[in-house]
Amino acid sequence: MTKELSAQRPPYLMIAVLFIGAFISFLNNTLMNVALPTIMQDFQISYATVQWLSNGYMLVSGVLIPASAFFITRFNTKPLFVVATSIFTLGTLLAAFSPNFGTLLAGRMVQAAGSSVMAPLLMNVMLVSFPIEKRGTAMGFFGLIMMAAPAIGPTLSGYIVEHYNWRILFTMILPFAVISVLLGLWKLENVIPTKKKSLDYFSIVLSTIGFGSLLYGFSTAGNKGWSDPVIITTIIIGIIGIVLFVLRQLKLESPFLSMEIFKAPSYTLSAIFSSVLGMGLTGGMILTPAYLQSVRHIEPMESGLMMLPGALVMAAMSPITGRLFDKFGPRVLAIIGMSIMTVTTYLLSHLEIDTSIIYIISVYTVRTIGISLVMMPVMTNGLNSLAPRLNPHGTAANNTIQQIAGSIGTAVLIAVMNTKATSVGEKMAAEAMQAGTFSEEVMASITQQALLEGIELAFFVATCFTLIPLLLSFFLKRVTQPQIK
């Protein structure tokens, strides 16, 4: 019997080390967006080019997260964490001292290659370390670090970019990354069962083409438009690649990413739930800053501070939600949480140009309470339905689905916003021209009103997204033992 299965007491110190690595990874991912305009000016590059610092990171993560199932199953915990964190540290070093944009982009992609395995590895250690009846509390603390990083990342980044050089965003991460490597060498143990299995290179090719193309297509559709031939082609290639990837896994005796996980009804339901929820969640997190900065003309730093209470509440609620999940199961929490999220998202679809700042902060913060009641409980319940041997595949598929759903949701909502704003703007401009009242001031007012109506419609569509998981909430059942052995 392996050490992790025979141990009575979970390896708390080891989990703490993994927490540090995962937190650094999550924080790093949220620091960059605010700094993009400054980096664009420093390197004298276009917005489309600098956007690759975010898109490139996302693409590498999206391609490698499915591979995390193979890495976690094949390699021991300690060397896997040390190598992944070392790769992340190397990428951080490259980015911090990059003499040009190409080196900076390479550093970001190397960072993504290292960080892509950190969160799945931590989740799997926690799944084998805690029994089903205690996993809610444990995963709640995982949710704490997952949500705390986005809470402080944009605000911290805004402050640093406003008062210091953007390179500090990397140099301040560097010592913590080095400490994580050293702690991993010192305190980590091999707690996840491994087995020798060969790497199917064709699966890697299909995974890269499928997930990479789909993520690229949807992540850039908001800027280039849905009619762009490149966008249409990459999305089609992505869908074909993913279909071929799934068919390949079904034929392999030892699959790269096992499709057996979807035989568990609770896992399949949680995957559908999380994907639809992720579409509305990610898009909503983009629409609120768009309203604050582009309609209300509030500075990025101030808008980040306005969203900070909601993010902090969501992080603080995660451990509490975990305990509630252990006590009551997922159904009650999901019904209450989705009801809150549906109502508050609908309220955000009725924002006005002069809506009270206190009202906006309050509704946004209450919305995050609903999110915290839903996300980790539903995901944990789905993973509880899997046998330990399938945990790496379950976490890898779950993270991949959420990332793709977030990209699709963002692309759809931005497209809805832009289409409505363009339509309203053209109509109002034509009316002003006909009435003879057209001027620069009138045009600025028209642009503001058109964008507001676009954001309102996008929030309404996001509300429709939330109705699907709200209905699915009533079908959730508490898992007390694996449904797939």
Image: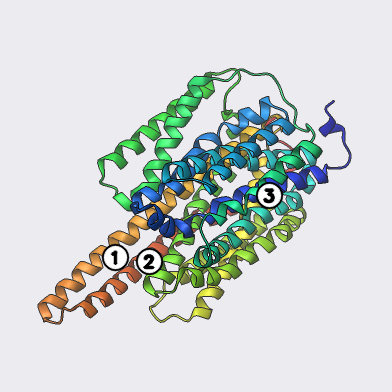
CB of mark 1 within 8 Å of CB of mark 2? yes
Residue at image mark 3: 176
Quadrant in the rendering for residue 172: bottom right
Location of residue 436 by image quarter = bottom left
User: Could you tell me how far apart the alpha carbons at marks 3 and 2 are, in whole angstroms?
Assistant: 39 Å
Q: Is 188 left, or right, of 31 in this rendering?
A: right
Looking at the rendered image, the disc whose residue lies closer to the viewer, 3 or 1, is 3
Taking the spot 67% from the left edge, 25% from the top edge, the residue there is: 74
Q: Is residue 35 left or right of residue 152?
A: left
Q: In x, y percent, where is residue 50?
A: 40, 50
Could you tell which of marks 3 and 1 lies nearer the N-terminus? 3
Q: Secondary structure at mark 1?
A: helix
Residue 471 makes an appearance in the image: no
Amino acid type, residue under disc 3 in the picture: Phe
Disc number for residue 421: 1
Which residue type carries mark 2?
Ile
Q: Is residue 289 above or below residue 201?
A: below
Residue under the image location 29 percent in, 48 percent down: 226
Hey, what amino acid is under mark 1? Ala
Q: Which quarter shows the C terminus? A: top right
Residue 377 placed where, x, y %?
A: 66, 52
Q: Earlier in the sequence, mark 3 or mark 2?
A: 3
Q: Taking 344 as reference, is 411 left or right?
A: left
Residue under the image location 77 percent in, 48 percent down? 16
Q: Is residue 425 left or right of residue 326?
A: left
* Number of marks drawn: 3
Estimate the x, y position of residue 406 in percent, counting from the top left.
48, 50
Name the one closer to the observer, 276 or 19.
19
